[in-house]
Amino acid sequence: MSNQRSAREAVAAETLTVDLGTETGPFHGGAAGTLYGLYGDGVPSRAVVEGMYVRTVSTKAQDGIQHPGADALEILPAFVAAGGRDVYVYHTDIHRGFPYEWPGATGEERLAAHLESIRRQAEQVQTLGTVKSHVVYVPFNEPEGNMFGTGEWSYDGVSWRTEPGPYFAAWQQAYHLIKGLDPEARIAGPNTCALYPEVRGFLEFSRDHGVLPDVITWHELSSPDEVRTNVAKYRALERELGIGPLPVNLNEYAHNYHLSVPGQMIQWIAAIEESKVDADMAYWNIAGNLNDSAVEAGKGNGQWWLFNAYGQLSGNTVRVTAPHPNVQYTLQGVAALDRAKRQARVLFGGASGAADLVLTGVDAEVFGARVHLRLQEIPWTGQVGASAQPLRLRDLELPVVDGRVTLPLTGLDEMSAYQLILAPGGNGATPQPPSVTWRRTYEAEDATYTGGGYAKNGPEGSPSDVERFATSGGHHVGGLRTGSDGVLAFDVEVPQDGTYDIRVFANSCNLADLVRENGPTNVFLRVDGEDPRELRLPLGYKWAVWGHTDTEAELTAGPHRITLAAQDPELGTTKGDAVVDKLDLVLRDEREAVYDAEYAALGAGARISYAHVGASGPGVAVAPRGGTVTFWVHAADDGEATVTVDLLGPGEGLLTVNGEELGRVRRGPVPLFLAGGINKIAVTGTSELLVVDRLRVGAARGLLPVRVSAAEEGVLTGTAHVTGLSYATGGKAVDGIGAGPGNALTLTLTAERAGRHALTIRYSNGEQAPATHYNPDPVCRHADISVNRAAPHRVLFPTTFHFNNFWNLSVPVTLDQGPNTITITADELPDFDGHTRNQYGLRSAYTPVIDRVSVTPLV
């Protein structure tokens, strides 16, 4: 982003105004909700869930047969432990199909059976202890399109919107049933597809019969402007009817075109936060990835980082005036002022080009005469493309003039979101340089294609077609597939000699015929016709679901041609079928990643101070005994990283990584094992005062010993067997583990020292259950892992979309010095009652296919 603005940009620049002098209420955080976003404990990882600040989850009833995973009572304890607030139990999803195929020959039989399933669920909830207070019952979902609509599976073939009597009676029965079992239970409804006019009658009936929901729910598969309009309309209805105000959850919102795209989702977040309601992102695709926020088990994409920034707003929200108020697909934002922290944060995005970000009401008693500004970009990285932390664009200090600060912006990208953090200036902080000094995007549809099979596909998602997926430039290119001689050539030009990261945004649908045969599509990259290398392009659950495959090249200043080909004379030919969206070229930054403590998450009495000489930034975090300073840290892969906690003064602290206590905070660089993706690193004060300046993360130095064992070298019992898979290490992996403890893999791994280690498993999982409607239904597999014959620890493994596509997953274990025996097995898990089995292939009896296992000390 340039500081310079052309005359044309100056004329075209819009203004986003943030009035820090007008507060609009306590920060709520309600937009961070998900429908079917959690599959089970570990998918996604605890760090991913906690760091996204997920507040509410809507999910299927326990043991439901609607989709694999996401069973309410299985996800509940881990979700609450990760800071979650409420789990909304969709009782209707106990049934198969959509519309729901509730059993029975008549409406009365169907309703009776449905109420009995609610009774069983409510009785199960009563066994959960204190976490049951986090359950919210949803007896009926979208009744007008399902149980009380006009279709085949309707109660009587008449919509409740026409004749509400049967639905109202069913609601009354369900309400009394649940409250009879637990008077403190919370019940949500009507859970309609929209805020229909007929909801008024529902509220009147519920008020008059003493069955008013504890939480009002409806779906906003509409637009952010309708969120604001409809919540206001509902609040007016409450006042008119003399009820409430009741909590509201818009427990399905946003479409495929919006999800994963920070510049789109900030518009929804702004509307939801302004309305002070909860809301859950809609479930259009697969369970367990936080609605296209989580990648693999433990990584986040751009959308995840947006919600991470949103969840760290604090204090009170303030008035934000957009250039086009309440108009979707324009520049929008949300902001909060925390007077105790002496910080304001602004999240904004949704438009390309230039804009002026104007802050008014900047209180001199809070910020002083000069302010320190940090501007970050949260780019789109695809639905299944992992993202590093937000990019630092600008770090500067400006004077406050008549309570006002203006920051001119250029080069905004409508797919990105941006964060501005405002803090007191004038403390001698050294402005940090941009994270990236040069980057360019090259669209595949603008590249030169030679050979056969070319297809320019699209347009994909757009404001007029929100059911399709977001795609850079709206189009993508096909042709690189089995039997093709195609070559896609990108003509690029770079400003200086150096190492450049090359990121190929691409996709192969895992169920496409040519992809089923071999898994990830391989293509061949060359630079100026030289330096060939094979790339395996990302798999996705549908076409146009984007991830990225990364490589690097040494380039000299000037023009170059980067080619992707289906054939290479030295390396071979493509197997599969891929589409390419774009190529990103980025000048490599070899510096350490820096996480400033004054922008970290604080807890248990930790505070920010702007008065410490020698701080690298405008402030520091000061932790009393027990106070915490938490950093959300990205690592590209599982393995060693060099981590330095910069302290000021003599204080002492405890270092915790992903819940593992690693001992006292040491001064200077320390080798730590980090999981690929999102890591929660916390510093806890253990002295009267600990002053934390920043945390730095650098490359590995080879100080942590790694011991690796190929799975086929282990002891295989029962049905476990070696299988050939081309992308496994050495072309071999072990399959058939599970369906009983006798079918096992046992490995011996040697640890140099006793203590906590990361057990990293390279695995594949292509199991997928038959779907009943538009949601693909990949199945997570699990493994019961026993170390030295101790009680097994259960680990859940998300889909890799194909059995020839391998990912890493790491779990902490305790090892003895010397040889250690690792035994891996599995069996089909029963339902909540401990003996009933699922009949629809929604629970696997097997572990994933295992390629290799390694152990690394955590520190």
Image (cartoon, rainbow, N blue to C red):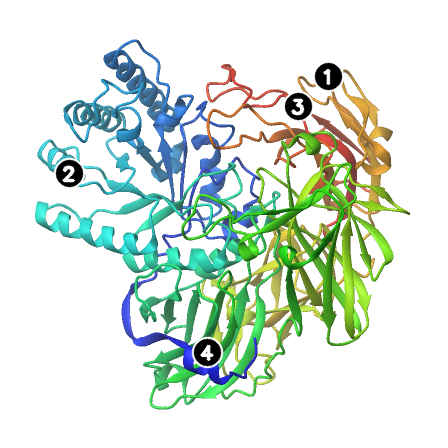
Q: Within 10 Å of the Cα at label 1, are there few (<14), some (14-19), or many (20+) other Cα atoms? A: some
Q: Is residue 811 visible?
A: no
439 relative position to 753: left or right: left
Read off the residue under disc 1. 742
Read off the residue under disc 4. 423
Q: Are marks 1 and 3 in contact (CB under 8 Å)?
A: no
* Circle 2 or circle 4, nearest the eye: 2
Residue 203, numbered label: 2
Above-or-below relation of 654 to 857: below
Among numbered discs 2 and 4, the one appearing first in the sequence: 2
Q: CA distance from mark 1 to mark 2?
A: 57 Å
Inspect the image, locate mark 2, and give the three-letter code of the amino acid beneath it: Leu
Among numbered discs 4 and 3, the one appearing first in the sequence: 4
Read off the residue under disc 3. 846
Q: CA distance from mark 2 to mark 4?
A: 46 Å
Q: Nearer the viewer, residue 519 or 527?
A: 527
620 relative position to 525: left or right: left
Among numbered discs 1 and 2, the one appearing first in the sequence: 2
